[in-house]
Amino acid sequence: MTNQELTYWVTLALVPKIWTRRKNEIYVKCFEHNPQISVIDLFENRSCWDELLLTDEEKELFSAAYEQLPSNSFMVEDMLSQGYDILPIHCDEYPKILKKNLGKAAPTVIFIKGNKELLNESSIAIVGSRNADKISLQFADNVAKRISASNGVVVSGFAKGVDRQALDSALEAGGKSIIVLPQGIMTFASGFKLYYKHIVQGHLLVMSSFAPKAPWSKEFAMARNPIIYGMASHIYVAQSDDKGGTWSGVMDGLRKDRAIYVRWPETGEKNANVQLIQKGAKAVDINGNIVNLDSENLKTEKQKETEILNNKILKILSSMESCSSKYICNLLGIDWSDAKMKKYLESMPQIEKNKIKSRVYYSLKNSLSNTLALNFE
């Protein structure tokens, strides 16, 4: 592909305020048009804009982007001279797995440096919290070394914590890795210096989908996460909170029926790993091996506590005809307000409320009382 074509592709990728999906849809229309409209024609021949059904706003944005062609041309020349590669979504070297997993949401152009062959090799993502605990870092180390031993590629987001541990463990084991940046690739000078040996040896590739000189941002870090997941055939999760990048990435992957493996936490750990497993991720041990769980294992601590409380309440009510919410609180020895206990009792489907002379009492529904009395003996 000529430098001129690359300049127009970069210009298309960097058009602001238009979603990546929409840019790719425009390209597909160019490709399917008879005769085909080249990426150069897309900017130089404005008469095709109506045929491609561009909106008035999109036409204005393309016109403004056209003015950036000279500076983009200089940037492309500069990048190529420094050993970077620019891969538009239609070229053969563009990672097939990224197009398969993200579809039209795959980056229109990616900027890379390193061994391009890694883009289309079997790859595994290892993800997790930036503030991961020791056992999660050990998990990342174990899985990265295991993947490296089987000649797989470890995909990393280069964040501190799990990402950096997975990257360094893979390289230390003589394995291969891909770094997916949350910034422009030309701002990664310190990283290229740090990992220069591994890049030269062909063990590492660095990639970015953002403007080459764009600095790191929280927005880019979030936008980078789907690309990490998109670059992998399997995803291993060391540790996740119940919100944030790891959680949202796993939830999106589960909706898309991706192969996701989450470390089964040890007793007392404070994370959302069990919740992700409950939602469909596969549980694995500290070495990444599948763990077979029954329904009891999958209950959270809160669910177990609720189940115990419910059983105690049902046992109390099975031993008497009816009683007040205040009396139940006293028997349980819990510091709840009367209003809170009433609300809780009325949420339990096995219990019914009765009103006698303006006072409220609770009892088991008739169909349950005899059975529960026997079960709790």
Image (cartoon, rainbow, N blue to C red):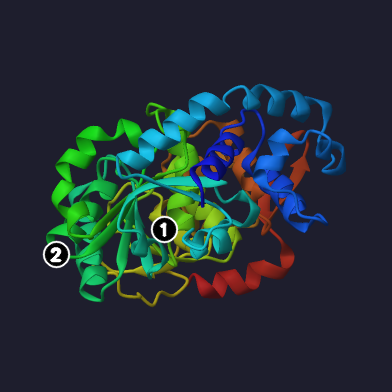
Residue type at mark 1: give it: Val
Q: Is residue 231 above or below residue 88?
A: below
Q: Nearer the viewer, residue 63 or 362?
A: 63
Disc 2 marks which amino acid?
Ala
Residue 183 in sight in this render: no
Horizontally, residue 68 falls left or right of residue 37, namely left
Query: How far across and how far down the image is residue 259, in percent?
Result: 48, 68
Q: Quick check: 45 above or below 148? A: above
Whole-percent x, y for residue 343 in the image? 64, 39
Q: Which callout, 2 or 1, points at the residue further toward the start of the chain?
A: 2
Percent x, y of residue 178: 32, 55
Residue drawn at 77 percent across, 51 percent down: 29
Q: Which mark is residue 274?
A: 1
Q: Which residue is depicted at the point 66% across and 22% down?
A: 64
From the viewer's perspective, tell me whether residue 51 is left or right of residue 120: right
Q: Secondary structure at mark 1?
A: helix
Residue 22 seen from this side: yes
Q: Which residue shows up at 35% across the image and 46% down it?
A: 157
Tell me the quarter of the picture where residue 350 sits.
bottom right
Q: Is 272 situated left or right of 10 in this image? A: left
Viewer-nearest of discs 2 and 1? 2
Binning the other alpha carbons within 10 Å of mark 2 as few (below 14), some (14 to 19) or many (20 upward) gives: some
Question: Is the Cβ of the residue at disc 2 closer than 8 Å to that at disc 1?
Answer: no
Report the residue marked by disc 2: 173
Nearer-the-camera pick, 306 or 99: 99
Report, in whole angstroms, how far the alpha carbon at label 2 lies from the one at label 1.
30 Å
Residue 370 point in image, percent of width and height: 64, 72
Which label was assigned to residue 331? none
> Is 18 in front, or is 363?
18
